Image: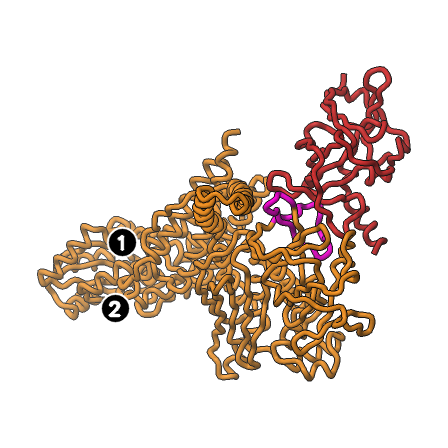
Amino acid sequence: MELNQYLSMFIDESKEHLQAMNENLLSLESNPADIAIVANIFRSAHTLKGMSATMGFEDIAALTHEMENVLDLVRNSKLAMNPFIFDCVFKSLDSLESMVEDIIQGGTGKADVTQIVAALRSIVTGDYNKPAAGGGAQAAAPAKKEAVKGIEVDEFQYSILQQSIDSGFHVFYIEVTVREDCVLKAARAYMVFDQLYQNGEIVKSTPSVQEIEQEKFDRSFSVYYISRIDQEALDKLISSVSEIQSPLIMAVDKTSLEEMSRSKAEAEVVSASKEIAPAAPAAPVAAPKAEPAAPAAARPAAGGAPVANRTIRVDIERLDALMNLFSELLIDRVRLEQLASEVKRSELTETVEHMSRVSSDLQNIVLKLRMVPVDSVFNRFPRMIRDLAKSLDKKVDLIITGAETELDRTVIDEIGDPLVHLLRNAVDHGIEPIVDRVAAGKNETGTIHLRAFHSGNHVFIEIEEDGRGINREKVLKTALKNGLVTQEQAAKLSDSEVYQLLFESGFSTADKISDISGRGVGLDVVKTKIQMLGGHVQVDSKFGQGSKFSVQLPLTLSIISAMLVKLGSEKYAIPLSSIVETAAVQRSQIRNIHGNKMIDYRKSVIPLVSLSHLFEIPDYNEEDEEETEIVVVRKGDKQVALMVDEFIGQQEIVLKSLGKYLTGMFAISGATILGDGQVALIIDPNALIK
Amino acid sequence: MGEEKKVIVFALGTEEYGVEVEKVRTIERMQPLTRVPKAADFIKGVINLRGVVIPIIDLRARFGLSQAEYTDATRMIIVSQGEYEVGLIVDSANDVIDLDTDDIDNPPEIVGGIKAKYLDGIARIGDDRLLVLLNLEQVLEKHEIQQLERIED
């Protein structure tokens, strides 16, 4: 079916739009009166509706349609956002996301959206607030609907009013209420009108004159009125009509005219609910009446017009193919360099040198192709933190810096889950409940800083919060209880070593297991995952003030510097990042302690590892030699010396995966292809250091 | 008439075996292998195939048959089964033939020292040729291997 080619486009674009809507909605929450943001959300919803309708995803189209209706009212200032509406729209977005997810998984994108649709519809009609409206809500609703059509002053009338003000006429906004016990409402209204006609001009009346004559109004009506008489006289005039309550007369000048037209929503409801005081919105439509200045001072919409994106979507498979081919090229380059040095022809050497330079540049570019800004991972966090904080009744501010920092695509895919876990921990365990924070003299809103930055050959991601910090004693207590450390070891541990204990499996000091965390399974998985990516995680904390989790990741995964070594006829590679030093030891220097071979190494004694034995090398055994070459490797603060046959040299190698069939190989993290086309296995030193 | 199946025919000793053509990526001559320490004994190592590292299994070892010297005729059949891409060392690989699925029978318990579970069936081709069809999924089944490794440890 032709639609299938469009399906992946639809999925990509829907995800983008949903993401944009989420972000915009979040910023709208902090600036509820910023209409420009609403317009952006509306546009996204509108586009989404069109796309999903074209693709035949009716449920998505229907839901977006209802969202559009709500958003339309808001962007035309006929409706103002409030927590209920925000929640509804967020819920709709969640629904849309799960429907799109369903489509990605091959489903139909159908879902039961009747509840949300009903909620959205009730927002449009205003029914959702039935209990909240002050008095006579039922009457208010339909009356308001009528009034919605009513008190708008159209442009023509608006300019008349403006010109009248300019020409020195008095412009009034008058609300007249007929007394409760009045029987002939229409007659009384007519009499008021009569008085008004004789003394000036009625620009607009709500309800319309015909409707008033037909008694199609509740108890009050309002008019915009131009006259030469002053307010007092006007008041007397209207009050002289019997069975009329004292009228509300507001002199209208230029600014209040603008206010009026903006808050006409409130005005309608005010008139409908019979509460004359304009300052007291019993109105379900809340807040913005009090801030007419806000829309006037409307900040330029976040970012203004979307910057035209000069990017192309590239299939990930193509990028991978490009990377593979390029790695082949690298291998040949090394080979050529070898050959050139053997052949020793100057032209050949020059050409090869030039080719090396060009391919180095190519290398940088290709590597950068795989780099993706962390923003793609970070962008779902604000929403997550918001929901989390809400559910825990805490106030949390998430400040993200460095979202444009780039990471290798494979790292990006894997780093999301650990970060989610760390962030959830920060909100759940780090930030204290509002009461505690205030008691501690802190701001009731906790802050979480999420930072990403480059440094050297690494990318750092930090999660820092100003919460309650880590209690060293509590951690040690649990560690002792779980047998992770002994009493004497505990005393000697530095603070950061104590905090590292948190990453041991089964460790949790949370007193209660919450839905979110506390099961003691999370942090060890986080650490493992980060280590699998070639990085590490560190904790810093001040009890009472907060904690900082720092994740360090390598910049690129696929090309690393390594030391090539020989073990008999076999070649192996050891990642340079793990190597401390290379040296040679004499047989006599090897001590035997408790059955383990050890050597003195710079003020400490470190274990010796026999690779020939571990790897069952057929043609090499260091016990046959007097002097053995060693490579000292490090993991954290532990060090170990690996015994090897010969050093070959340092080289940049391209990491190759061993494939899905060979998983879990002992102490081997991958393979590389050497200049001669042979495969060399890459040793994982961490597996050799316990 | 049943369906047609195209099969690549290879030999282990005197027996002939078949693998569906769709699963075969390429057939290569023997190359020097890089040994992988501590792997199951039938995993002879890995090779570099145009930039991709492929693990190589010796089928004789996998089936517990006696080992043989590699000759000029020895080939590596690179197959793709599910997520796995693996090379199988065989004594020789020569033919591609068409089989009718009707002609495929269930294998008896042990054929040529290979347990029936590794086999998909037996087909009679021509007058006196018997072709044993391999069940690649079972051949590449890792669970058993992991158990083997655990026993060794």
- Is residue A450 shown left or right of residue A169? right
Colour convention = by chain
At label 2, which amino acid type do we have? Ser
Within-10-Å neighbours for mark 2: few <14, some 14–19, many 20+: some
Q: Is residue A661 magenta?
A: yes
A15 and A490: which is toward the camera:
A490
At label 1, which amino acid type do we have? Glu
Task: Provide residue A493's location: percent of width, then percent of height.
Answer: 66, 80
Instruction: Specify the quadrant of the image occupied by residue A600.
Output: bottom right
Question: What secondary structure prevails in the magenta region?
Answer: loop
Question: Residue at image x 35%, y 52%?
Answer: A39
Give the numbered dot on residue A246: 2
Task: Provide residue A583's location: percent of width, then percent of height.
Answer: 65, 67
Regarding mark 2 in the picture, which secondary structure is present there? loop
- Is residue A426 shown left or right of residue B111? left
Q: The magenta stretch spans which residues?
A: A656-678
N-terminal of the two: label 2 or label 1?
1
Q: Tell me the orange chain.
A: A
A246 and A562: which is toward the camera:
A562
Chain containing the residue with disc 2:
A
Q: Tell me the red chain.
A: B
- Is residue A462 shown left or right of residue A492? left
Give the numbered dot on residue A250: none
Chain containing the residue with disc 1:
A
Regarding mark 1 in the picture, which secondary structure is present there? loop
Question: Residue at image x 65%, y 77%?
Answer: A498
Q: Mark 1 = which residue?
A: A152
